[in-house]
Amino acid sequence: MGSIRLEGVHKAFGNVNVIPNVDLDIKDGEFVVFVGPSGCGKSTLLRLIAGLEDLTKGRILIDEQNVTNAPPAKRGLSMVFQSYALYPHMTVYNNIAFPLKMAEMDKATIDQKVRAAADVLNLNDYLDRRPGQLSGGQRQRVAIGRAIVREPSAFLFDEPLSNLDAALRVNMRLEITELHQKLGATMIYVTHDQVEAMTMADKIVVLQAGNVEQFGSPLELYNKPANRFVAGFIGSPKMNFVAGAPAAEHGVHEIGVRPEHFDLSTTDGKWKGTVGVAEHLGSDTFLHIKTDVAGLLTVRADGEFGVKHGDTVYVTPNPDKIYKFNEAGLAV
Amino acid sequence: MATQSSRSAARLMMAPAVILLLGWMLVPLLMTLWFSFRAYLPLRGGDQGFVGFDNYVRFVTSSAFWPSIVTTLAIVVGALAICIIFGVLLAILLDQQMWGQGVVRILIIAPFFVMPTVSALVWKNIFMDPVNGLFAHLWRFFGADPIIWLSDIPVASIILIVSWQWLPFATLILLTAIQSLDTEQLEAAEMDGAPVLKRFWFIVLPHLGRAITIVILIQTIFLLSIFAEIFVTTGGAFGTRTLTYLIFQRVLESQNVGLGSAGGVYAIILANIVAIFLMRIVGKNLDA
């Protein structure tokens, strides 16, 4: 079991309100990702849930139990840190066994649980090594192993993949998602990378300056962003925002169009522009187009689109996929 | 240091320092060895030629030898124990955020700047004096009979003085080690359910292992040769004669350079035994 509820959570460091007021309801077994730009308070929020920071105001409930003032060990959560925080003087085996030893389990049970966890994570060959002798991905797995042996009600991940190289990150992303399906436990995952958020999450919490901008499934956030910030943050490359005359046509302050929601043509279309940079990725082509009416736009074309710097192209936004925002940046 | 020419240039540049240091070490060593085989009594006939291993035999068979070894080890082990236990505690204390941290740190380090002779005199006259010392006043204030520190518990007194001098060094090294501990590790241990004392035992102490090793190695070398503290306080009386002090007495008070030199060679051997012994026990810590 592992439902987590935050009620009116407020955290201030001195005079700085890091988290003004957050209400959040995370159901048992959900994979929830906190995402936002750096300094938005997502790690602080995670640490509040973990119990590593004290709340200034509000309540945290785990499985309907009020744990607001409970120490971290009593909350039944385990955490994977950004630096992994492995104990360098202990072998992999002892690292994984540490939480069980602290719980004063008997040797046989510890051994059985550690080996089971090592099986799940393919760590059997490394149990006698020390963290210093492992690669980044292996250390990551040890940190996860140490988290899962205790069978916690929820896992907390604090940017666990940010120290890995790009290829390994994609791999570990899959492994963590698979682990979630295998264990079925609640997981809260903090990242600043919206791709990680989109690919892994059941639900995403978009944070900005300590406020929850939107809470919903990845596709909900992609299709129905609540405001300009979420619209700009979710999706890669970033959504194009156009104010002025084109927006006035739709009767709003500003419109947004994703790079993938344009029709491109070399002969005719709504907005005329010249190609600045063309990024040919093979499967896609990203064009940076300078238009007279709508300013600089990023446009995605399927496959190869044979234009180069300085060519004239016409872009037409897909009329069903135009997001409209009012002066306050809220979606209308 | 990649190319042949840069390597030979480096050797050339280092040569003067290496030669000077080598000479600095070798000349006294060779002279000690030379005198240790000779009957050399400056006031009683001068250099009287080779006597083989006579000096060596006389030095160990003298009734003062084994007690001096015991005293030496007692002082080294006692001072080390105090320095490490209190050094770790002080380092943890100084690592906490507190008001006036900078000043407190300087005050803690201050004893290290005091010369051994001066600190021994300060302790002897200001603290440990049985009539006018601060301790005597303190004891009398509580209605107790003052301890006559330097004759009743002389070895403990000297350990106290020496520890006071060397505690700052241990604290300083242990403090830098504590500051290098990753706070996420402590948080991880906290999440793993380890209470404060277990966090100290399983995380902080192993992390300090290397620093403790360094403190033990360096301080042992210096503590084996303490002299001024004994000379100034007890003058080697009341069972405070260490090996170093015994050698001093043989050479200067008995005016027997040959016998003293033989003792010096024993001291070299003892220091090396201790060094090898320590390296083997704790050397593992330095590899990790």
Image (cartoon, coloured by chain):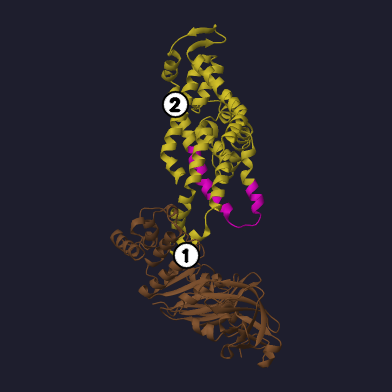
Q: What is the three-letter code of the residue carrying label 2?
A: Pro
Characterize the magenta stretch by its predominant secondary structure. helix
Residue B67 shows which numbered tag? 2
Chain ID for label 1? A
Q: Secondary structure at mark 1?
A: helix
Q: Which chain is brown?
A: A
Would you say residue B220 sits in the magenta stretch?
Answer: no
Task: Judge by depth and name the residue closer to the eye, A170 or A59.
Answer: A170
Q: Which chain is yellow?
A: B
Which residue appears at 49% of the width and 81% of the height? A218
Q: Is B127 positioned to the left or the right of A81 in the image?
A: right
Q: Amino acid at mark 1?
A: Ala
Pair 1/2: label in front: 1
**Observer able to see residue A68:** no
Residue contact at pointers 1 and 2, CB within 8 angstroms: no
Q: Residue at x 48, y 22 (%)?
A: B265
Q: Which mark is residue A167?
A: 1
In percent of width and height, residue A96 lies at: 38, 60
Residue A2 coordinates in the image, percent (x, y): 41, 77
Residue nearest the observer in this picture, B153 or A207: A207
- CA gap between label 1 and label 2 equals 68 Å
